[in-house]
């Protein structure tokens, strides 16, 4: 397989621009992207094994993953607004992405839990303490959704 120098150069330029813009947020966003792909693949495998494969559910999963990226973008915008407000108040907080990083780490953890659920659903051995943790997290999330 031949490498295309134009594609390689374009990819390098995009990654360099993202690195320059996002700074310390680039690596967590790349990790988020990787675990989103792992979750989607493991979810598709689980659906195939359980014979519940559905293009509608798969498309919904893709839309959900895209909304995660929008949530990170909103976090970055909030950080930018906070930096601007602090700068106008005479305080220095340049280059920090607190809200964006918080959103990204939360989504990474959420995706990792989903991957564990999918792997367990495929019949892979998952340590019992992780299964209990997943159940507890799902129960707590359900309680919060119901307003308890």
Image: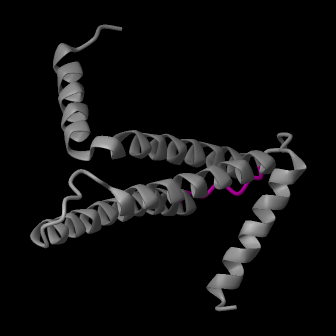
Answer left or right for 8 relative to 125. left
Answer left or right for 44 relative to 12. right
Answer left or right for 58 relative to 98. right
Q: Which residues are magenta?
A: 50-55
Most extreme residue toward the bottom is 147
- Quadrant of the frame with the N terminus: top left
Q: Nearer the viewer, residue 105 or 142?
A: 105
Q: Nearer the viewer, residue 103 or 79?
A: 79
- Magenta highlight: main SS: loop
> Residue shown at 24%/50% (left/top)?
95
Magenta-colored stretch includes residue 54: yes
> Residue shown at 66%/48% (left/top)?
115
Residue 133: percent from left, percent from top: 79, 60
When the figure is inspected, residue 63 is found, relative to residue 26, above or below; the finding is below
> Residue shown at 17%/72% (left/top)?
85
Question: Residue 41, located in which quarter of the rendered image?
Answer: top right
Magenta-colored stretch includes residue 20: no
When the figure is inspected, residue 141 is found, relative to residue 21, above or below; the finding is below
Question: Residue 80, located in which quarter of the rendered image?
Answer: bottom left
- Quadrant of the frame with the C terminus: bottom right
Residue 60: percent from left, percent from top: 50, 63
Label count reads 0
Most extreme residue toward the front is 90
Residue 15: percent from left, percent from top: 25, 33
């Amino acid at each position: 397989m031949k490498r295309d120098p134009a594609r390689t150069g374009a990819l390098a330029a995009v990654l360099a621009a993202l690195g320059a813009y996002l700074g310390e947020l680039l690596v967590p966003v790349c990790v988020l992207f990787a675990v989103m792909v792992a979750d989607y693949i493991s979810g598709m495998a689980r659906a195939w094994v359980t014979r519940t494969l559905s293009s509608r559910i798969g498309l919904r999963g893709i839309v959900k993953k895209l909304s995660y990226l929008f949530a990170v973008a909103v976090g970055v915008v909030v950080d930018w607004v906070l930096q601007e407000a602090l700068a106008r108040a005479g305080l220095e907080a340049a280059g920090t992405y607190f809200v964006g990083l918080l959103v990204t780490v939360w989504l990474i953890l959420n995706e990792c839990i989903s991957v564990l659920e999918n792997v367990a659903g495929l019949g892979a051995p998952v340590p019992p303490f992780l299964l209990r943790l997943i159940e507890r997290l799902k129960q707590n999330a359900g309680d919060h959704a119901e307003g308890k």
